[in-house]
């Protein structure tokens, strides 16, 4: 059976291209002046593809990975010896043909002929000391001593009797011994096997005789600070003249599935004379490891609340690179038994790269009809979606500008960069929060911040002395939306922390110096879209020198510059005299009463079926997958408006009312508008819509508009749809775009190179 497995392993190495990679790595290693003493050759194995070659070997990899790794190690060792001997023979032949005479110092004495190991005979790489001692006592005379000059020949002659992993050769030789080769398995293809998925502590086996593989998927709740471990170490015999003094004879390499203590022994013994070994201080190599807590993904039934305990997983070296708290994780792990009552340990052997979400192949029915009906207008489709968006929370037309901003923000969600932050300003924070909560359900991931949670994160030290970084709300919403809630009720230090993260794109997790670290904070990239609402009237107590908002006639508090500049879209939901608010409140009240009565009667209101939630989520997935490029006309409008507005709204004392990040915000809004309209090119129409939304926010905040725009947080309830989203609106937007072009040419024409 082992012969069959060795043949199948060799066939897999050939078909997967691993053998060619090993060949290239060995050739590169031979060209180095001082090659690394340990040759690492990770073997990537896809279980589904391996089953087509040999189903027994695939089952062995899953159920007995340690034995499968030894088989792959043996095959790789045989292949490496053959490759290196072939290279040496080629080099010798070339030197003979070219008649090159080497100096005595440069001449490398060729090693004696080494018979290739028999593929049918398998040597274990991980023998215990007790087993070795027993075999040695039965087969070897402990009084054997040899001269240093005959070391190689003596070891080769003893190789048939000693339970060594391989024959040991001189250090100057390029041929690798078995202890010098590290062949970790990187297994994939387990995600589709339900029996191998670990969704919690209850899926871990209680009785486990030997390690086996499993698959986990979830989100990282916290991650420990990296610590060091010994990757490999080399020993030499302390008895003069012993064969065990040969270098690379006693090499211990850390292997996943074995305790770390097996790599570094307190009392190691020589395999030949059973004397004590001493460590070679120049050969030890250290690596880094980190422990993470993963909250597994759950597929709970409807209306069933499931409590899940996080899994503790160890990641080493390259597997922990790039990971941060709050990030989604899919990994193949090795479950190793531990002494009762401890749970089996989980050791990562392969962290799978994130798989992009595959959008549906076709548009949902409701959206398909809308796209076909609005294809003649560049603005109508997106405005119609905003009009119908969240109609089950507030009636269509109410909070229209905020819904429009939230829809644009949902289209801009990404796990590669910060999203489009939205701040709703108004006194009716109850309704604003309902809108934020409902809208966040259609994001790839949503997290609602609580006062019990940290905004950025926290550093804690457990009982074992490990320092952990726990993910806060901004980190846990990685790739999705974090609903901050009422931002006006945040403490000043929390507001400053959020503003720093939104402004710099970096989340800082502070920790106390008593925890034993020199740095005062850890930094992680921001990959979250932040939403919040703000009530200026309750921000803080009124003072004599407070600045009043021109439209709301209430103190702005901390909303002046420090907050409005970092949030991409600041939407004011109230007007100066409040006529729109009174009309909107009447419509919302009637809508709430109708919903309550129809719910009791067992019916659904017509507004709930405007945009079905499932179809809306499918459409947003399609929108996020669209890659857009900017046209020259769109860039001209955005750049020209930005320069002109900063010049006209500038102040020599307080600076410009337009933040520096406004150009980036308008670019995000324009690209989201193009995606929602299913366009791959950002045209001037999208740039005009982005400028209009930005100008409305500036007009509501400052009390005047350079383009004569009147903020409209709510749509008039008695206006026909042609005026709101139809041809009349297209005419209005076309006129606005022309006005914008004239405005840009007038106020930036004297600046060469701006446009």
Image (cartoon, rainbow, N blue to C red):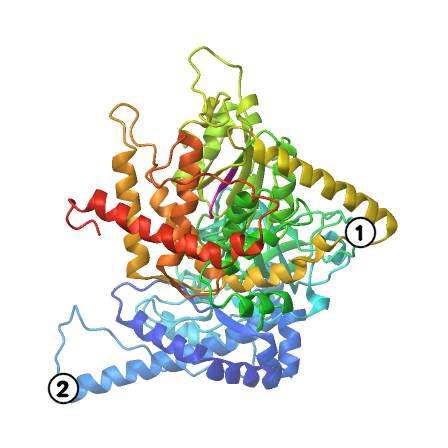
Q: Is residue 568 above or below residue 199?
A: above
- 393 sits left or right of 743 in the view: right
Q: Residues within 10 Å of mark 2 (few under 14, many from 20)?
A: few
Q: What stretch is highlighted in magenta?
A: 419-423
Q: Is residue 77 magenta?
A: no
Q: Vertical placement of 739 versus 378: above or below?
A: above
Q: Main secondary structure of the magenta part?
A: loop
Residue topped by disc 2 = 98
> In the displayed structure, does residue 247 sit left or right of residue 254?
left
Residue 502 x %, y %: 44, 39
Which residue is nearer to you in this view: 602 or 747? Answer: 747
Please give the name of the residue rendered at 68% of the width and 41% of the height, measured from the top-left corner.
587
**Residue 696, horizontal then vertical, whole percent:** 43, 40
Q: Determine contact: label 2, label 1, CB under 8 Å.
A: no
Asked whether the viewer can see residue 679, the reply is: yes
Examine the image and state in which quarter residue 332 appears.
Answer: bottom right
Who is closer to the viewer here, 76 or 594? 594
Q: Which residue is more in the foreground, 193 or 109?
A: 193
User: Which circle marks residue 303 in the picture?
Assistant: 1
At a point 77% along the width and 49% down the height, the residue shown is: 306
Residue at the bottom extreme of this rendering: 97
Circle 1: element type:
loop
> Does the stretch in magenta take in 420?
yes
């Amino acid at each position: 059976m082992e012969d069959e497995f060795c043949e199948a392993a060799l066939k897999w190495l050939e078909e997967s291209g691993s053998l060619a990679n090993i060949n290239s790595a060995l050739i590169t290693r031979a060209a180095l002046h001082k090659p690394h003493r340990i040759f690492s050759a990770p073997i990537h194995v896809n279980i589904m593809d391996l089953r087509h070659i040999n189903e027994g070997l695939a089952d062995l990899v899953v159920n007995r990975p340690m034995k499968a790794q030894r088989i792959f190690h043996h095959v790789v060792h045989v292949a490496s010896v053959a490759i290196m001997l072939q290279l040496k023979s080629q080099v010798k032949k070339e030197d003979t043909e070219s008649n090159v005479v080497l100096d005595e110092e440069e001449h490398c004495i060729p090693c004696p002929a080494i018979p290739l190991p028999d593929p049918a005979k398998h040597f274990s790489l991980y023998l215990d000391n007790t087993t070795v001692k027993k075999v040695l006592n039965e087969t070897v005379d402990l009084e054997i001593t040899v001269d240093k000059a005959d070391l190689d020949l003596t070891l080769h002659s003893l190789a048939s009797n000693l339970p060594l992993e391989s024959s040991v050769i001189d250090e100057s030789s390029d041929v690798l011994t078995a202890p010098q080769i590290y062949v970790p398995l990187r297994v994939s293809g387990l995600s589709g096997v339900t029996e191998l998925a670990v969704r919690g502590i209850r899926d871990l086996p209680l009785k486990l005789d030997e390690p086996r593989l499993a698959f986990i998927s979830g989100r990282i709740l916290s991650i420990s600070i990296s610590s060091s471990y010994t990757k490999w170490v080399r020993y030499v015999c302390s008895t003069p003249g012993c064969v065990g003094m040969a270098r690379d004879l006693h090499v211990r390499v850390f292997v996943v599935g074995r305790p770390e203590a097996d790599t570094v022994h307190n009392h190691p013994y020589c395999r030949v004379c059973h004397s004590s070994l001493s460590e070679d201080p120049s050969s030890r190599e250290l690596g880094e490891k980190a422990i993470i807590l993963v909250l597994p993904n759950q597929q709970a039934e409807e209306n069933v609340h499931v409590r899940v305990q996080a899994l503790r997983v160890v990641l080493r070296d390259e597997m922990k690179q790039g990971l941060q708290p709050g990030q989604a994780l899919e990994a193949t792990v090795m479950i190793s038994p531990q002494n009762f009552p401890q749970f089996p340990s989980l050791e990562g052997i392969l962290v799978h790269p994130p798989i992009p979400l595959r959008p549906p192949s076709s548009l949902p029915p409701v959206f398909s009809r809308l796209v076909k009906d609005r294809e003649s207008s560049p603005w109508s489709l997106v405005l119609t979606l905003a009009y119908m968006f969240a109609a089950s929370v507030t009636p269509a037309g109410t909070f229209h500008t905020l819904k429009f901003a939230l829809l644009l923000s949902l289209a801009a969600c990404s796990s590669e960069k910060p999203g489009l932050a939205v701040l709703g300003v108004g006194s009716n924070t109850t309704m604003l929060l309902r809108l934020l909560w409902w809208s966040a359900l259609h994001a790839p991931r949503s997290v609602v911040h609580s006062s019990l949670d940290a905004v950025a994160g926290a550093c804690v030290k457990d009982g074992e002395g490990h320092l952990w970084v726990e993910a806060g709300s901004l980190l846990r919403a990685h790739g999705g939306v974090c609903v901050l809630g009422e931002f006006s009720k945040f403490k000043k230090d929390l507001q400053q922390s959020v503003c720093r993260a939104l402004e710099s794109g970096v989340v800082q997790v502070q920790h106390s110096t008593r925890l034993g670290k020199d740095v005062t904070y850890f930094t992680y990239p921001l990959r979250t879209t932040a939403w919040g609402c703000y009530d200026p009237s309750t921000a803080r107590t009124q003072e004599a020198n407070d600045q009043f908002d021109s439209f709301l006639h209430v103190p702005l508090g901390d909303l002046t510059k420090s907050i409005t500049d970092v949030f991409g879209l600041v939407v004011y939901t109230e007007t100066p005299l409040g006529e729109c608010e009174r009309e909107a409140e009447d419509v919302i009240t009637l809508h709430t009463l109708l919903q309550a009565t129809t719910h009791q009667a067992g019916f659904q209101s017509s507004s709930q079926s405007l945009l079905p939630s499932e179809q809306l989520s499918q459409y947003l997935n399609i929108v996020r997958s669209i890659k857009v490029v900017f046209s020259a006309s769109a860039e001209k409008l955005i750049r020209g408006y930005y320069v002109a507005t900063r010049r006209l709204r500038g102040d020599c004392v307080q600076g410009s009312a337009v933040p520096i990040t406004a150009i980036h915000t308008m670019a995000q809004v324009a690209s989201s508008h193009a995606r929602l309209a299913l366009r791959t090119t950002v045209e001037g129409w999208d740039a005009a819509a982005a400028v209009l939304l930005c100008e409305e926010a500036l007009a509501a905040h400052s009390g005047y508009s350079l383009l004569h725009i009147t903020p409209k947080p709510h749509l008039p309830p008695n206006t026909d749809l042609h005026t709101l989203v139809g041809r009349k609106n297209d005419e209005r937007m076309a006129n606005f775009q022309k006005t914008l072009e004239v405005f840009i040419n007038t106020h930036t024409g004297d600046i060469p190179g701006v446009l």
